[in-house]
Amino acid sequence: MRISALGRRALRGRVAAASFGGMNQGLASPLAAILILSLAACSQPAPPADNAPAVAGEPLATRAVMIGTEGPSLPACSSISRVKGGGTDVYWAPGETRAVKAKLAGGARVSLCEAADNDAWFGIVFAAPGTDPDMCGVGKSVQNVREYQGPCRWGWIKGGTVQLGG
C-alpha cells in the first residue's frame, strides 16, 4: 500500500502532535513543582540587615574607590596616611562589614582618596606587601574623577583607623 506525499505529511503531523501531547503532560508535574518551590522561596522574610558578623566571605555590596575627587590640580588621592597601631580591616564598600577584603597592619601606608558618610569611612589605595607604593599612581593628578583601577589594591576602612598625613 502506497501513501501519497500529502498523506505522509498528514501522518507525520499526527505522530508529532501525539508525541508532543504526551511530552506536554509528562512535563506538567515537574514544572508545577518548580513553580511552587520558587514561589515558596520568595515568600520567606528577608533576614535583618545586622544579623551577620564581620567574617570573610562574599560581600553584599561593593563600591569602587574614586580618585581625583579634589580636582585636576591636586594629586589623585589627597593624603598619604598610616594605619594606627593594631591594624585595620579593609572592606568592599562603606558600611559593608560582612566581608573583609584585606587586613592592614599598624603602620601600613595608605593613600586616602575619598571620604564617605561624614568621614566615617575612607576609600583607600594601598600597595600589596613588598610592592613599591609609588607604583600605585595616585600621587599624580587626574583630569576627571574616576574609579581607581589599579595596579595596587583598594578598599574602604573605618574612619579613625588611620593617622592623617602620617
Image: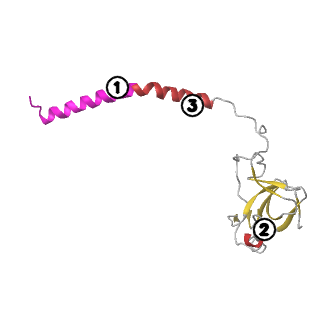
- Mark 2 or mark 1: name the one nearer the start of the chain: 1
* Residue at image mark 1: 22
Q: Quarter-wise, where is residue 110 in the image? A: bottom right
Could you say whether the residue bearing mark 1 is in a helix, strand or loop?
helix
Q: Quarter-wise, where is residue 85 in the image? A: bottom right
- Distance, label 1 to label 3, CA atoms, is 25 Å
Identified at 83% across, 68% down, the residue is: 80
Label annotation for residue 77: 2
Mark 3, residues whose alpha carbon is within 10 Å: few (<14), some, or many (≥20)?
Answer: few
Q: Is the residue under label 3 in contact with that under label 1 (CB below 8 Å)? A: no
What percent of the width, then of the height, locates residue 22? Answer: 34, 25
- Distance, label 2 to label 1, CA atoms, is 67 Å
Question: Vertical placement of 81 versus 59: above or below?
Answer: below
156 or 103: nearer the eye?
103
Q: Quarter-wise, where is residue 104 in the image? A: bottom right
Could you say whether the residue bearing mark 3 is in a helix, strand or loop?
helix
* Residue at image mark 3: 38
Question: Vertical placement of 84 versus 55: above or below?
Answer: below
Under mark 2, the amino acid is: Cys
Q: Main secondary structure of the magenta part?
A: helix
Under mark 1, the amino acid is: Gly
- Distance, label 2 to label 3, CA atoms, is 47 Å
What percent of the width, then of the height, locates residue 31? Answer: 47, 29
